[in-house]
Image (tube, rainbow, N blue to C red):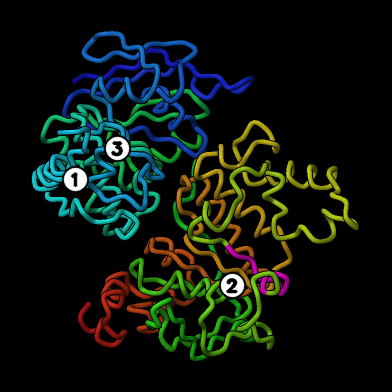
């Protein structure tokens, strides 16, 4: 089925999110929509999916003009969408989620769950998904949950699939698996719209690339285009794709972790006897495949884990046993890996989110009174500095794109006087221009003499930022190695090999 968008325009008040955008997706083609955060990519796809109504322009399927009053109409016409944040009911099984909204019944109006299970098995077998129809969604890894979203769309005979930032929450291994799935879909004649800002993924699977900047199409590119060419089209200027930093000048050990063990609700050791130190003026990057204890380690540093053994000291002050408020007040900045769950309040405005961990005193609160002018001036400054794309500082943060939400978190945490910065997946969901900016700010924080812990599953980011690298595997630290350690060695360490064995094998 051929999809064509002609002159799509969508306005929100004075903001034109899409300005006469046109593109075509042929059957069996991966058409990549590339652009920085807030460029209008997701808005365009929400128009296509019937979530928004275009102010101008037309949607055509096989040359026939369509009028979608909502997602139901789009799905009936053969359009499916895999959202960045999954639209699944966590406590339902895979089969229940797949049939939700399209329930089949049999005698006496009973739900035909066996038919839904059979549909899941059939699609799963066809694409090699290995998804159990009776598995409860909340117990599945993120990559498998995404497969459930794809099965949902395919079960409704989608001929065009939209992937909206599908790799933002995936590990590198899950991303590679998704690329393989997209190739399979393409081979079976499915048209794919792939929204992303990750250049490697674009060049890996795209047949055609359309670049959007500030709501307008600014050009088309070939998958053979270089990363620098694509980045310049996206951002409108030359972008540094490598981190420029001087050698670290570390001073005294500021953060000292000794014998740290974290127990989960079942008494299992998810962090096992971990010890390390981070000196003033250096970046320690924690690498590893997602799920090897990195999340629990960062949560323990912030006082978020209830069952902790061992010691965590910052400038000689013990943090184990202190609450989150006390840890933050001790000068710890925290960028959580899940911004929606732990970093932001979606219903609050941008300005309100920028004062979340400074809501009990100066400069934003005096006595019992909020200093609105001070807060608004601060928010306006940070929105400009971090290039947060929004209508105003009074916009609810939940209405921002994922990348712009991440910028709000970073603006808040990097604008305090810090004695330690803990940044988990700091550039998740960000475009190349924003990644460049964030990396520079993290390096600047290091150069100000602040110890920095960066936790990232992006090996490119680890290698680019780290002065030293701690590799985690099954809750423990396999080894701590210099920041210039070869990627091949790090990859073997991430699979559990010691630095010595990994070095010889590589």
Q: Choose mark 2 or mark 1, whichever is in front.
A: 2
Label 1: how many Cα within 10 Å (few below 14, some 14–19, many 20+) = some
Q: Residue at x 66, y 59 (%)?
A: 414
Residue stretch rendered in magenta on the structure: 327-334
Q: Earlier in the sequence, mark 3 or mark 1?
A: 3
Circle 3 sits on which residue?
Answer: 100
For the view shown, which residue lies furthest in the right direction?
A: 367
The tag on residue 302 is 2
Instruction: Examine the image and state in which quarter residue 250 appears.
Output: bottom right
Q: Choose mark 2 or mark 3, whichever is in front.
A: 3
Q: Residue at x 29, y 43 (%)?
A: 97
- Image quarter of the C terminus: bottom left
| Residue 406 drawn above or below residue 388 | below
Q: Say whether residue 251 is visible.
A: no
- Image quarter of the N terminus: top left
Left or right, 417 with reference to 505: right
| Residue 345 drawn above or below residue 473 | above
Q: Front-most of 498 and 55? A: 55
Left or right, 274 with reference to 128: right
Q: Earlier in the sequence, mark 2 or mark 1?
A: 1
Q: CA distance from mark 2 to mark 3?
A: 39 Å
Instruction: Examine the image and state in which quarter residue 289 appears.
Output: bottom left
* Disc 1 element: helix
For the residues labelled 3 and 1, say whether their Cβ atoms are less than 8 Å apart.
no
Residue 407 x, y percent position in the rendering: 58, 49
Residue 344 x, y percent position in the rendering: 59, 52
| Residue 412 drawn above or below residue 31 | below
Q: Residue at x 28, y 71 (%)?
A: 491
Circle 1 sits on which residue?
Answer: 181
| Residue 258 drawn above or below residue 370 | below
Q: CA distance from mark 3 to mark 1?
A: 23 Å
């Amino acid at each position: 089925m051929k999809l064509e968008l002609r002159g799509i325009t969508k306005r929100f008040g004075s903001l034109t999110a899409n300005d006469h955008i046109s593109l075509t997706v042929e059957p069996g083609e991966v058409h990549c929509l590339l652009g920085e955060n807030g460029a209008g990519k997701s808005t365009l796809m929400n128009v296509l999916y019937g979530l928004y109504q275009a102010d101008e322009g037309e949607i055509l399927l096989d040359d026939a003009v369509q009028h979608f009053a909502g997602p139901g109409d789009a799905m009936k016409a053969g359009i499916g969408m895999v959202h960045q944040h999954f639209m699944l009911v966590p406590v339902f099984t895979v089969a229940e989620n797949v049939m939700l909204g399209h329930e089949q019944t049999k005698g006496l109006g009973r739900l035909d769950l066996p038919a839904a299970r059979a549909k899941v098995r059939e699609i799963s077998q066809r694409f090699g998904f290995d998804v159990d129809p009776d598995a409860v969604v909340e117990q599945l890894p993120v990559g498998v949950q995404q497969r459930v979203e794809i099965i949902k769309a395919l079960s409704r005979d989608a001929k065009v699939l939209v992937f909206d930032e599908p790799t933002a929450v995936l590990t590198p291994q899950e991303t590679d698996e998704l690329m393989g799935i997209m190739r399979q879909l393409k081979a079976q004649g499915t048209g794919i719209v792939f929204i992303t800002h990750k250049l490697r993924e674009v060049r890996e699977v795209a047949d055609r690339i359309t670049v959007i900047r500030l709501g307008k199409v600014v050009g088309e590119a070939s998958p053979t285009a270089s990363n620098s060419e694509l980045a310049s089209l996206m951002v409108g200027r030359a972008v540094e794709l490598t981190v420029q930093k001087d050698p670290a000048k570390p001073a005294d050990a500021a953060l000292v972790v000794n014998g740290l063990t974290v127990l989960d609700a079942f008494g299992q050791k998810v962090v096992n006897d971990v010890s390390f130190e981070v000196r003033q003026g250096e970046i320690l990057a924690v690498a590893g495949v997602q799920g090897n204890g990195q999340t629990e380690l960062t949560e323990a540093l912030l006082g978020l884990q209830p069952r902790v053994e061992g010691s965590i000291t910052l400038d000689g002050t013990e943090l184990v046993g202190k609450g989150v408020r006390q840890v933050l007040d001790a000068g710890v900045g925290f960028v959580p890996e899940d911004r929606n769950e732990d970093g932001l309040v979606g219903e609050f405005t941008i300005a309100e989110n920028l004062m979340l961990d400074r809501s009990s005193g100066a400069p934003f609160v005096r006595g019992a009174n909020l200093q609105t002018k001070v807060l608004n001036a601060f928010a306006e400054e940070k929105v400009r500095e971090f290039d947060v794309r929004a209508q105003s500082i009074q916009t609810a943060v939940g209405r921002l794109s994922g990348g712009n939400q991440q910028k709000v978190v970073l603006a808040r945490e990097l604008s305090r006087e810090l004695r330690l910065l803990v940044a988990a997946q700091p550039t998740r969901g960000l475009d190349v221009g924003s990644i460049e900016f964030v990396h520079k700010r993290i390096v600047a924080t290091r150069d100000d003499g602040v110890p920095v812990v960066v936790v990232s599953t992006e090996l490119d980011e680890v290698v680019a930022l780290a002065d030293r690298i701690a590799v985690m595997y099954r809750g423990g630290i396999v080894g701590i190695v210099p920041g210039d350690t070869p990627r091949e060695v790090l990859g073997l360490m991430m699979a559990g090999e010691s630095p010595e064995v990994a070095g010889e094998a590589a």
